[in-house]
Structures are given as C-alpha cells and as structure tokens.
Image (spheres, rainbow, N blue to C red):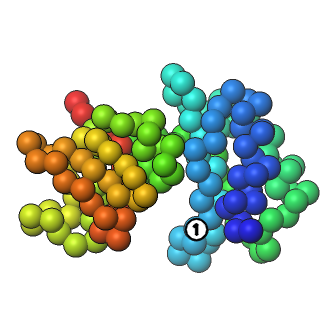
Amino acid sequence: MKVTELVASFAQPVVEEKGCRLWDVEYVREGSDYFLRIYIDKDGGVDINDCEAISRALDPILDEKDPIPGSYHFEVCSAGLERALKRPEDFSRFMGSPITVKLYRPYNGLKEIPCTLTGYEDGKVTVLSGKETITFEKSQVALVRLRVEF
C-alpha cells in the first residue's frame, strides 16, 4: 500500500469526525524536504480552525503509526477553490462546472484550456470550449482543475 493510501485510511475517520471531508493526501519532495499534506473540504469552506483541529488530532496518530521513514513536514490544508479533480466522484460532483484542462501537448495552440466539464468516462474528459465539444483521452491530460470565474 502506498504511503498516501495508508495515511488516507486512518486520516479519513478523523477528518469526518471534525465535520470535514478528506479531499486528497499528498506525499511529495520539494527541494531537499519531504511534505505530507492532507487536503480537506467542507460545505461552506474550510478555515484555519478546521485545519488546526485536524492537524492536532492526526499528529499523535502519525507518530504512533509511523507510516513514513525519515523526517517530513506535516500540513493540513484546504482543498482550495481551484482544486484538482482526480477521482471519478470528483468529476461527477463538479459536472457542469468551469474547469481548466492542462494538456501535455497543445490543442489548437493551447496547453491550458478554460472550458466547462460536460462528461467523464474511463479517464476521458469531455468539455465544452466556446461552442466546441472536445473529448480528451486520459493520456493527453496532465491535470484538470476547477476554475473560479469572476
């Protein structure tokens, strides 16, 4: 089991107990440091108090379970307004929402396409960009992120 899956398995009940949803778990190297980040969400938005309460509750569990050899920085963060969509349920929840699709290779000269999410099936993302409906294969898509319009 990957570190992120292991951490998610014991973080999810703690996050839900505090009235939030677990959005994602990330374990990444940035420079010479490693970071374990728990991303949370809740209706009405996450604030610093939610992050602090969950961090305090998870800290002793992480010490006890010790899922990561070596040192790392632990952070609990809001998933944010422009969060990445990764799981099928993320795409279902935000169907019809404005998104940005980041591509590995340009499509009509663009690597980032502002559009509206209209479909998702087996990793294929279907969008409406202007008046054009486009379906991108999973292999074309680097990232799909919610887009906030002002």
Q: Position of residue 130 (x, y in %)?
A: 10, 43
The residue positioned 80% from the left and 65% from the top of the image is 67
Q: Position of residue 30 (x, y in %)?
A: 53, 70
What amino acid is labelled 1 in the image? Val
Outermost residue, front side: 121
Residue 6, compared with residue 39, is above or below; it is: below
Q: Position of residue 81 (x, y in %)?
A: 41, 38
Image quarter hosting the C terminus? top left
What residue would you read off at disc 1? Answer: 28
Horizontal side, residue 136 vs residue 91: left or right: left
Q: Element type at marker 1?
A: strand
The residue positioned 11% from the left and 48% from the top of the image is 132
Horizontal side, residue 106 vs residue 37: left or right: left
Residue 77 showing in the rendered view: no
Residue 116, compared with residue 20, is above or below; it is: below
Instruction: Give the camera-side residue of 48 and 41.
Output: 41
Residue 61 showing in the rendered view: yes
Residue 53, compared with residue 125, is above or below; it is: above
Outermost residue, bottom side: 32
Image quadrant where residue 139 sits: bottom left
The residue positioned 8% from the left and 42% from the top of the image is 131
Horizontal side, residue 104 vs residue 9: left or right: left
Packing grade of label 1 (10 A; few <14, some 14-19, many >=20) is: some
Horizontal side, residue 86 vs residue 64: left or right: left
